Amino acid sequence: MGLTITEKIIAKHAGRTSVTPGETVWVSVDLVMTHDVCGPPSFAIMEREFGSDAPVFDKEKVILIPDHFIFTKDPASIRNVDLLRGYAKRKGIKYFYDPANETYRGVCHVGLPQAGHCRPGELAIGTDSHTCTYGAFGEFSTGVGNTDAGFVLGTGKFLLKVPKQLLFLFEGELPKGVMGKDIILTSIGRIGSDGATYCSMEFRGSAIRSLCMDERMTICNMAVEAGAKNGIIAPDEKTREYLKGRTDKPYTEYQSDPDASYAAKYEFKAEELVPVVAKPYSPGNVCPAKEVAGTPVTQVYIGSCTGGKTADFRAAAEVLKGRKVKIRTIITPATKEVAASLDTEKVGGETLRQIFEAAGCDPIQPPSCGACMGGPIDTYGRTMADEVVVSTTNRNFPGRMGSMQSQVYLASPYTAAATALFGVITDPREVL
């Protein structure tokens, strides 16, 4: 019996020729990422268990990237960044992306790939559930808790149960108005928000291969919203092209064997996909955008690791060009690189920034997680009571973006931008 790409990567890092779903193995880790929310407690656990002077297992394989609550006057948030800064200095960690200087990159899950830290065949963990984003590069990546992270910081080892394998096959050509966000929401809608609990979600097919890396990252980013251990897409020429100039380290590409075994397979005809939204209060509460069209909205938010990449803003600009928004529309680039692209990428001869400004969007925000996780009270775009938001972020639980009374609909940048034009949920095919 053959192996899936996920099984091959785990086996390699366990020093094995094969692994079986359900068994537990020790694996060596290629990368550990942590940010301002979980970094301080992870390091505190490490020092408690290994000693205050204990070094990290590898100074070049630990990435510290504050991004969640950084552009704020909140003292607790400022303290957390200061703590990370101190750990980076004391431990001699090479990669600390400090929001106080030019090394700052932005949101971890977009900043790490852009900095060349994500490569096919590697195994990465992070103290953030959306670490599964890096599966877009043919890499096994998953989120862990602070205790696991503390142990890995000291040892470079991780005790991992091999997940069951699920295959999501999308064949055909995607219709206009359908994006990677619609693919992952459709997948979650099919199986439910717990339908992939501790499983690997592998995405394949001609529709997946047609997507750029930004879109593939969106898909893998939200695998955890179905309970998955990881999401993964096999590397190809688009992966290699993205990595050119970003990393010079060698990597190994893996593909699933033709006779690999899957616990379940889900097949979709790409041409039948439609723009969808996830209604409050679950990413699994999915329906066609057309079904809730006309629902009044008070705010549109386009940003986050899920929906704040260059491809996301290009899609939004296609909808907004030559038009005016009717409601507050917030643009928050995920990283500095994405923010710079707003001045270089063009739609119809105008830069993305020019299009957003002419459309009447709010002033473009500095790159960070922004209001995706609510944040301190001074976080720009944080929801207030009774607000109804269409957002390109990844979660819409009660209080996720601020107020417990607000309602958040998750959608693609196409759908979010179309909604901004009319102040009601709008199927983007109506304006594209």
Image (cartoon, rainbow, N blue to C red):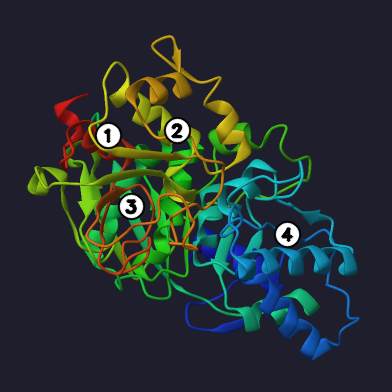
Residue 63: mark: 4
Residue wearing tag 3: 184
N-terminal of the pair, mark 1 or mark 2, is 1
Q: Amino acid at mark 3?
A: Ile
- Badge 1 density bin: few <14, some 14–19, many ≥20, Cα 10 Å: many
> As displayed, is residue 36 above or below residue 252?
below
Residue wearing tag 2: 311
Q: In the rendering, at what x and y percent does residue 174 appear?
A: 27, 34
**Helix, strand or loop at mark 4:** strand
Of residue 182 and residue 99, the one placed in the foreground of this image is 99
State the residue at coordinates (28%, 54%): 185
N-terminal of the pair, mark 2 or mark 3, is 3
Residue 174: mark: 1
Q: In the rendering, at what x and y percent does residue 11 appear?
A: 63, 70
Left or right placement of residue 368 versus residue 90 in this view: left
**Helix, strand or loop at mark 3:** helix
> As displayed, is residue 272 above or below residue 267?
above
**Marks 1, 2: nearer the viewer:** 2
State the residue at coordinates (51%, 21%): 345
N-terminal of the pair, mark 4 or mark 3, is 4
Disc 2/disc 3 C-alpha distance (Å)? 16 Å
Q: Amino acid at mark 1?
A: Leu
Q: Amino acid at mark 4?
A: Ile
Q: Residue furthest top?
A: 349
Left or right placement of residue 287 versus residue 103 in this view: left
**Marks 1, 4: nearer the viewer:** 4
Q: In the rendering, at what x and y percent does residue 326 appear?
A: 22, 32
Disc 4/disc 3 C-alpha distance (Å)? 27 Å
**Helix, strand or loop at mark 1:** loop
Res. 155 in view: yes
